[in-house]
Amino acid sequence: MAIDQEVLGEILLPYPDKVKKNRVKHIVRKNQDIGCQEIEANTRTVPGIISQRGCCYAGCKGVVVGPIKDMITITHGPVGCAYYSWGTRRNKARADDITPPEQIYGAMCFVTDMQEPDIVFGGEKKLAKMIDEVVEMFHPRAVNICATCPIGLIGDDLGAVTKAASERHKIPVLAYNCEGYKGVSQSAGHHIANNVLMENVIGSGDAEKNPSEFVVNLLGEYNIGGDSWEIERILHDIGYRVQGVLTGDSSIEEMKNMHIANLNLVMCHRSINYIAEMMEEKYGMPWLKINFIGVEATKKSLRDIAQVTGNEGFIRKTEEVIAREEARVLPVIEHYRKICSGKKAFAFVGGSRSHHYQYLLKDLGMQVVVAGYEFAHRDDYEGRQVIPNIKTDADSKNIPELDIKPDPELFKEAHEHLNLTKEKFDEVCSNVQLGNYEGMYPDMNPGNIMIDDCNHWEAEQLIKDLKPDLFFAGVRDKYIAQKMGVPAKQLHSYDYSGPYAGFNGAMNFARDVANCLTTPAWKFITPPWEQEPQTGDNHA
Ligand code: CFM
């Protein structure tokens, strides 16, 4: 589907020259003839623009460390930061053999509630007292402390407070200097959280691996609406053991022993590629980019994993599970596909889903004509081969890069992790790309648009011009589209639905999307600006 070049012109027209110059670099229309163009990403939003982005604290606390179910995460800052990052992401957790129900804290919200006097006189004592209270009342296995903007500004020494608290209570108390203003978006918070977990948690356990098992970690999967439970169901059916999920429904107990796995599976590349890379450097553990959103994508991911094991048993069992699941879900999906087919959608999500959901929508015969990432980096659009060419600016230099060295005892070559001979490993690598992500660009159709850090004005303009049938975004943007008469669905929290991953998820998603498209509600809505002005005596 071709998108008129004029549309892009119209979007940029009202901007001042400086803004125009900036924004034009963030918008790329796929042109088959010239190959992948460079897109500007992970740079500062123009001040004053209503961005869809969140902050560094949101990426650290809200995204990566918040879901760890048996750790208490204390927000060191004002109550609002804690309140607005509490519970809305729908990352689910449940008790199991490792974690009893009383050690799951996700439903609670912990905050030091910094007030003006604390800003003036410092918040360290308040924080230390809060840690003591929390430990006394809840006996958590470990505690996270996430800093918000004012903490960095007043200079509270988080490291000193957490070190002393760790010694007092004999449990890990981890400090995250993820002040909201660090970096240009929540992406910086992902990186900070990855660093702290790598330095303090992963590899600190002493579990022994059972050599007869093939063990995987699922990285960058946060169990929104129950996604990771569906993925784990399928992986278990094939016969893999999942050591840890980072961080959906995860426990610190499981995360400590993630170093015993054979293979890391990377779902959300943006939020977790740092840990995948650091574990590769430290342990030699290979990683594989997978995507469990969509039936075809799930099948490909399962087949790739089976290939990587080099084990005929897994390869056979994978085909059995795929055949069994397809027989069950495809007829249902086909029913909804009749409604969805041919429709076009926009997808504005953070850093992965605008790509991942293109597969699921393709299963339904739909096409994503505009795909936007809020805070992804160039590699998420263009593929990892561009990483060496990405300019590091002052904002990215703010985030420390850890100096990871091979572990003298635990480092093994990739083929040894997989229990393969070097020859077999080379054969596997010629079929499946380990340690790579090709980004969104190859999956876009010619003429369609990739847009980075899209804003309110641009989203509205694109809706007017391209008239999508469905708008996928977050809660801030959803109602812009709905007021314009376009059905909208949240792809961050899935509204109240899910799971959307795996085979069952594809069925749920097809049903929800078909419902959105067929509801008669839109016909009954008159936008406020088209209504008769309501003046005069309402009691008449
Ligand atoms: Fe990864 Fe995520 Fe996403 Fe993300 Fe997020 Fe998210 Fe997202 Mo909202 S970790 S980048 S920071 S897939 S919370 S579960 S939906 S913006 S596209």
Image (cartoon, grey):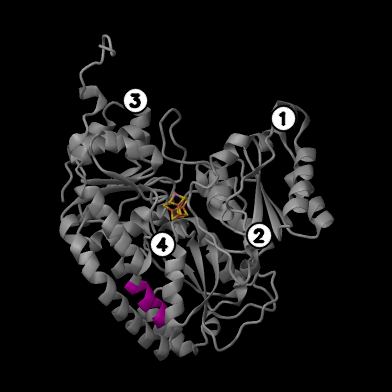
- Please provide percent x and percent y for residue 306: 40, 81
Q: Is residue 132 left or right of residue 413?
A: right
Q: Nearer the viewer, mark 2 or mark 1?
A: 2
The type of residue carrying mark 3 is Pro
Q: Earlier in the sequence, mark 2 or mark 1?
A: 2
Reading the image, the residue beneath label 1 is 119
What segment carries the magenta color? 299-308
Spatial distance from mark 3 to mark 4, Cα to Cα?
34 Å
Spatial distance from mark 2 to mark 3, Cα to Cα?
56 Å
Reading the image, the residue beneath label 3 is 16
Asked if disc 2 and disc 3 are in contact, CB closer than 8 Å, the reply is no
532 over 230 or under it: above or below: above
168 over 16 or under it: above or below: below
Local crowd size for mark 3, using a 10 Å CA cut-off: few (<14), some (14–19), many (≥20):
few
The type of residue carrying mark 2 is Glu
Q: Earlier in the sequence, mark 1 or mark 4?
A: 1
Residue extending farthest to the right is: 168
